[in-house]
Image (cartoon, helix red, strand yellow):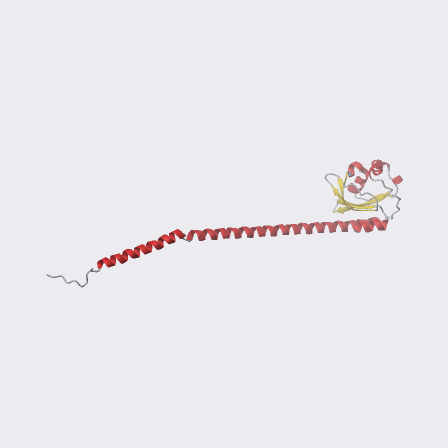
Amino acid sequence: SALGRVLTFFRADRCGLLGVDGERQVINVLYGAYAKGLAGLPGEIDLVGLFPWGARTLLAERAPVIVRRLADLPPEAAVDRASWDQFVPIRSNLAVPIKAGDVVTHILVMHWVHTESDFPDDCVPRLRLLGEMIVNALHRKRAFDDARAGRRERVQRALEGCADASIQRIEKDRGRHTEHQPSQGRRRQGARGARVEDGIQEGTAADRRPQHPNRIERG
């Protein structure tokens, strides 16, 4: 992964991409790469409560937090140092804010746990560019996934609509066929009635014929 290559290049022990929740003032670990045997960062971190100096530097000033040696931390970073010692012990730290417009939405962070790192200052803009590229790629992937999910939902609705229309057409045709087709009992009764009428007509014609056609009446 990209974070894994950054971890190896800088010989760091942790490298993570953090998402910033501006409303709750917390950060969430989105992706991370870690040295073998080293525990990852917790899923959610109270940035303002645990690292107030770092939060002000990153979110308000939109500047990187560069800590090559903990002894170089300013006095106003006392709470931050205590939180590092208690929750994520480190020797050096580099956190680079990633902005969307004027708002910091992500943070690319690296930790050195076992040794101090004298990383150069010119790596900061390079890491910021890398972070922006990763965030843009994530946004494109999310947009693609949303579009694919929306397309799948539209296709499903279309299929359901076609199925409903087909069922309604079948039921309508079945009802029309039942309405116009005479029942079998009525057909049999009609046939018997026709035979009875034929018999009556034949009998009537026979009654009209003289019974003794060869008889001569005498006067």
Residue 122 visible, this angle = no
Q: In this view, which residue lies farthest toward the bottom?
A: 214
Depth check: 89 or 188 in front? 188
Q: Is residue 156 left or right of residue 140?
A: left
Residue at the image point whose x is 37% and y is 53% from the top: 188
Which x, y percent locates residue 189?
A: 36, 52
Which x, y percent locates residue 137?
A: 74, 51
Depth check: 195 or 87 in front? 195
Residue at the image point whose x is 66% and y is 52% from the top: 148
Residue at the image point whose x is 39% and y is 51% from the top: 185
Which x, y percent locates residue 168?
A: 51, 51
Q: Is residue 163 left or right of residue 200?
A: right
Residue at the image point whose x is 26% and y is 57% from the top: 203
Which x, y percent locates residue 21?
A: 73, 41
Residue 131 visible, this angle = yes
Q: Is residue 179 left or right of residue 58?
A: left
Q: In this view, which residue lies farthest toward the left?
A: 219
Q: Quadrant of the C terminus?
A: bottom left
